[in-house]
Image: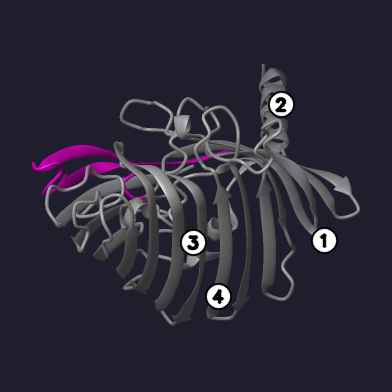
Amino acid sequence: MKKTLLVAALSGAFAVSAHAQSSVTLYGLIDAGVVYANNAGGHSQWQQGSGALSTNVFGLQGSEDLGGGNRAIFKLESAFNINNGGYKYGNDIFGRQAYVGLQNSQYGTLTFGRQFDSMVDFVSPLSFTGAGDRNNLAAHPFDNDNLGASFSTSNSVKYTSANLYGLQFGGQYSFSNQAGNFANNRAYSLGASYKNGPLSVGAGYMQINGADGNTSGALLSSDNDNAFAAQRQRVYGAGANYTFGPAQVGFVYTHTQLDNIGSLNINGNSYAIGGANLHLDNYEVNGRYALTPALSLAGAYTFTDGKYEGTLGNQSPKWQQVSLQTDYALSKRTDVYVEGVYQHANGGGDTPFANASINTLTPSSTDNQVAATVGLRHRF
């Protein structure tokens, strides 16, 4: 009997050891809470929130050592709605990220598949919406610069350099995959970042051509990959963060230029604005302060200056948004949070940009909108 127990114990130990050395990791994040909006389509609204701050994800990632400083890597990542278990990106099981590639400790990483663009990689981490596990409610209006990582691009080839004394750079190209129409619904981006002690800076550029594809291309309207169906979308920006003691301050600027917009999807509401051009400049100041190792305060102010030219007349929509958050870590993997967001819009005329619209919420029927949420996040 004792021998049997010893063999079972050793077998269990070897199984745990083999699992610990496995090159495949299951990971994820679950964010659930309650969200209140003072005006959602003309009415106040209480709702159970799914990913109010952080997108709910689960995924598999792994690597294999090929020798000589080379590794084969992969990632399969799904985003989901915790309220009903459905996929966030259309009906795509791995709609957030799905790629395979090669990594070299000296020359960098080359990957192929569905991936984020360079604005997400290099500028987003410096913003309030993109720092840490992200903050969906705090995204710039309509997440027009994708710093909130609202969409990924399909059919993409991506290169990211190794870390060169704090400097890192990269680029990505997403094929249209359309026969005889190479340039339609394609995307490409470039970016770089530099970290030296308490200072972090980053910059990026992204361009999308003809983002209205239904069957193939960088973005798919059937999967709600992008809020704007425009003939051409160009985004560029830069940001910086500086940390001193328990505090961190940052500034981010981005410019979004949308040419010949066919339609606009605002948090599930579709608006036809055929032939319009829209330029948006986003200016964000953000800060964080750790009161204790477990308790932190954070906030941001964003001013978005817009210019609309189209069938609904020439307008100058503007948005001001304030976000305030407190977060308490119950453990290394679990935290609770409280956040409030206020947005004021003006100058939109008769366009869909006249009313306030905090990201992920139903737009307000007025030029003001207030949202508050309390939630729980768990990482595994």
Q: Magenta residues, as a range?
A: 25-53
Q: Can residue 299 be seen from the camera position used here?
A: no
SS for callout 4: strand
Kindly identify which residue carries mark 4: 201
Q: Main secondary structure of the magenta part?
A: strand
Q: Is residue 26 magenta?
A: yes
Camera-side mark, 1 or 2? 1
Q: Nearer the viewer, mark 4 or mark 2?
A: 4
Sequence order check, earlier mark of 3 and 2: 2
**Residue designated by label 2:** 11
> Could you classify mark 2 by the number of other residues whose Cα lies within 10 Å: few (under 14), some (14-19), or many (20 or more)?
few
Name the residue at the bottom extreme: 244
Residue picked out by circle 3: 124
User: Outermost residue toward the right?
Assistant: 68
Query: Secondary structure under badge 1?
Result: loop
- Tell me which residue sits at (39%, 26%) in the image: 86
Q: CA distance from mark 1 to mark 2?
A: 41 Å
Pointer 3 and pointer 4: residues touching (CB < 8 Å)?
A: no
Residue at 73% in and 32% down: 14
- Label 1 belongs to which residue? 107
Provide residue 75's location: percent of width, then percent of height. Answer: 64, 40
**Disc 4 from disc 2: Cα separation:** 50 Å
Mark 4 and mark 1: span between their CA atoms?
22 Å
Asked if the residue at tag 2 contacts the one at tag 1, i.e. Cβ–Cβ closer than 8 Å, the answer is: no
Q: Disc 4 or 2, which lies upstream in sequence?
A: 2
Q: Earlier in the sequence, mark 1 or mark 3?
A: 1
Residue extending furthest toward the left: 43
Mark toward the start of the polypeptide (3 vs 4): 3
